[in-house]
Amino acid sequence: MHTDTERCVRAVRSKDARFDGWFFTAVLTTGIYCRPSCPVVPPKPANMVFHPSAAACQQAGFRACKRCRPDTSPGSPEWNHRADLVARAMRLIADGVVDREGVPGLAARLGYSTRQIERQLLAELGAGPLALARAQRAQTARLLIETTRLPMAEIAFAAGFASVRTFNDTVREVFALSPSDLRTRAPRDASHATPGALSLRLPFRAPLNPDNLFGHLAATAVPGVEEWLPHSPNGVGGTPSGAYRRTLRLPYGHGIVALTPRPDHIACRLTLGDPRDLTVAISRCRRLLDLDADPVAVDGQLRADPVLAPLVDKAPGRRVPRTVDEAEFAVRAVLGQQVSTAAARTHAARLVTAHGTPLDDPEGGLTHLFPSPEALAAVDPETLALPRTRRTTFTTLVSRLAGGELHLGADSDWPGTRARLLALPGFGPWTADVIAMRALGDPDAFLPTDLGIRRAARELGLPSTPAALTARAAGWRPWRAYAVQYLWATDSHPINFLPAQATKEP
């Protein structure tokens, strides 16, 4: 979008927050860059140039605006609905791969040469993988500076910098303030009182309907790994009330996150065993809640169908509830084949108790990390309370995941991974597509064989057979995964309501 100067100028003049993250405005006269919704008086069009990323602005010599804090914009929705090389690279960079494995590691994961990746990222984003990772490190450093009391040297290495000097130089260059000045300007809050706990605000593009998003996560929560803390006057242990909480398996350790919907952001409280995991934890929480989606584009497309239009108008901004661990979700999808939500939770809870990694949670009832594929591959199939055919499906899946023959991650190629899943014994279209939708993030994944979808289709007068419904849904592309959320919402199942609302349902 940054190449359409006239459209960008209109967005800046109207301070349209919908375009935050789509492009950045660099002001030639001041040397700063802003998000489109910056509250300051817009500069003259002749003094504005537009860049596709914060990294490109920084590489061109601009520093971040202190008013609108463009480094905290929602991520570009482009990386959510695309599966090409650039989109997959951006998802991996957000997951910290460049910091941990370097550009060669990024290239190896994607199956391309470093030169090809550099060329394509430069062409589309105006910055290469190192510059993009550097911009992300700067944002992580700012979060740690402002929300913790950690010494600056620890922050430098936790944010991924190779030296304290590079950390200091980058912070001064990007924010026009020293690390100490950033900390001095930061507001004091209760987050500093609890060692290891970070309180953050996760931005999103409005509208966002939290009902099905948090309702789905709460209704399917695996005891010990996930929980919903109900509304209470003061919360629990400093955790916001009405919070979805879960454990996180991260590259350097483990973490616990509490996520609470607010009108203009998601309140996020993170407790990390190692602060180097902050960038990855934030990225995975954003993916879990689908916070970088563009609801205006999605709902606009779905409203074009007269059957879906009333559903969208009634509750716009539905997101696709996703996952923080793709392998975990695939295992849970197999456990949920042809059984109720409650039965699937029971099966998963047994695995967690027997094979999960124990941890301490001083603020609630979380007890374990979900078992890794390696731990599950060692499980005796005869101990699983599953039908024999599903045991075979389970053991085949976890052995392929543990052995590296099957990879599920943010960088997965959607069509190719779906085909590899369908080749596994016991994997039908429903299992492959629900993994594609919720684990891999494919916004066009569709579930025409799902009983809830077929029931909704009949009630709305849509074709209810899988083939006919798939043909009818062609007009919903490339957002059929979001159409699934609107169709599911016609039912009174608990997944469609926040727990406090679900108790009011007949």
Image (cartoon, rainbow, N blue to C red):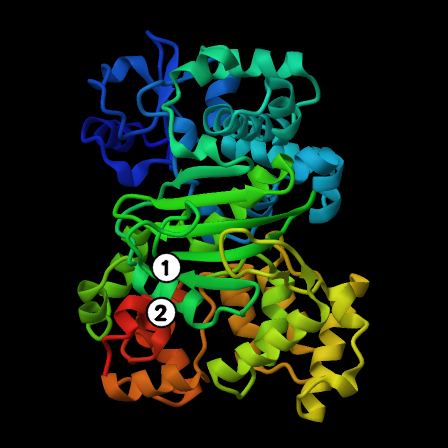
Disc on the earlier residue, 1 or 2: 1
- What is the x, y in percent for residue 26? 37, 19
Q: Which mark is residue 319?
A: 1
Q: Position of residue 294 (x, y in %)?
A: 34, 50
Q: Is residue 378 left or right of residue 252?
A: right
The residue that label 2 is drawn on is 485
| Image position of 417 with respect to 462: above or below | above
What residue sits 23% from the left and 14% below the top? 44
Alpha-carbon distance for marks 1 and 2? Answer: 7 Å
Task: Identify the image quadrant of the C terminus.
Answer: bottom left
Residue 111 visible in the displayed image: no
Q: The N terminus is located in which quarter?
A: top left
How packed mark 1 is, by other alpha carbons closer than 10 Å (few <14, some 14-19, many 20 or more), is: many
Q: Are marks 1 and 2 in contact (CB under 8 Å)?
A: yes
Out of 379 and 53, give the one closest to the viewer: 379
Secondary structure beneath label 1: loop
Which x, y percent locates residue 314?
Answer: 18, 66
Using the image, determine if residue 493 lies above or below residue 361. below
